[in-house]
Image (spheres, rainbow, N blue to C red):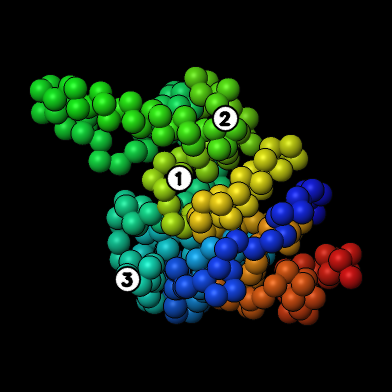
Amino acid sequence: MSETEPTAAAQAPGPGTAAGEVLLDVQGIVKDFGGLRAVNNGSLEVRRGTVTGLIGPNGAGKTTMFNIITGFIPPDSGRITFRGEDITHLRPDQVFDRRLCRTFQIPREHGTMTVLENLMLVATQQSGERLWNAWFRRGEVNRQEERNRAKALEVLEYIDLVPLQNEYAANLSGGQKKLLELARTLMVEPDLVLLDEPAAGVNRTLLKRLTDNIQYLCQERGITFLLIEHDMNMVMHLCTPIIVMSEGRKLMQGTPEEVRTDPRVLEAYLGGQYGAAAG
């Protein structure tokens, strides 16, 4: 287990945790890959204003569920609604346009572009993408680019990456790339961000910064998070509620205390070690 040092504020759920509306509703998802059933009637809810954890053993179907929610993989059956809209069969770009964003286990930065350019590239509806505008409406294109640059610098300020704005993304450390991934999602002012193992490969100093950023963005900016993570200290101190998956379906959902003491979780995932240590 990691020895992540949580902040005191990290234990407080975001605004509206108890009574927040259901932002994401996933019901009855099934996904087979040949003879393997990766998700078996998987269901979960994410309420607005929370940092919701999604944990489970390797092969439980967590990342497959993320891929289905964000349109990278179509489900065989089931239904996904986001802000009350059915998004089950939307493409990834269509899901993204609805301000549901994600990061990946392995960051997908544009290595030959600077940190600042990586953020500016994310901005949607850029008029310079149209050849006509690039030729005949240069003033409009330049003004929009300056607005995108200002927004990107604002985001980098939140994430504390301003000193690296002109560094090529390929030169960043693993932890810095995770921060860059989070920063890129913020360029579209998301309602919900799905984080796939944000702590993996991140040193303790950057992990604390990442954890603090997530907590701040939830509490102060109103962004909801659903994260997959194997760092149990991070999950137990950051997330409320926590959803546990096993064998492609939800095993249980509860508070950190309920999860760490549930016999089914100790058997399926934690092996009793974390529960014994926490008890």
The residue under label 1 is 185
Of pointers 3 and 2, the one earlier in the residue sequence: 3
The amino acid pointed to by label 3 is Asp
The mark lying in front, picked from 3 and 2, is: 2
* 152 displayed left or right of 95: right
Q: Which residue is mark 2?
A: 161
Dividing the image into 4 quarters, which one contains the C terminus?
Answer: bottom right
Compare residues 276 and 119 and report the one nearer the observer.
119
Q: Position of residue 150 (x, y in %)?
A: 40, 29
| Residue 133 located left or right of residue 148 | left
Specify the amino acid type for callout 1.
Thr
Q: Earlier in the sequence, mark 1 or mark 2?
A: 2
Residue drawn at 49 percent across, 19 percent down: 166
Identify the residue at horizontal 45%, vertical 27% (top origin).
116
Amino acid carrying label 2: it is Leu
Percent across and percent down for residue 267 are 77, 75
In the rendered view, tell whether residue 89 sits above or below residue 128: below
| Residue linked to disc 3 | 86
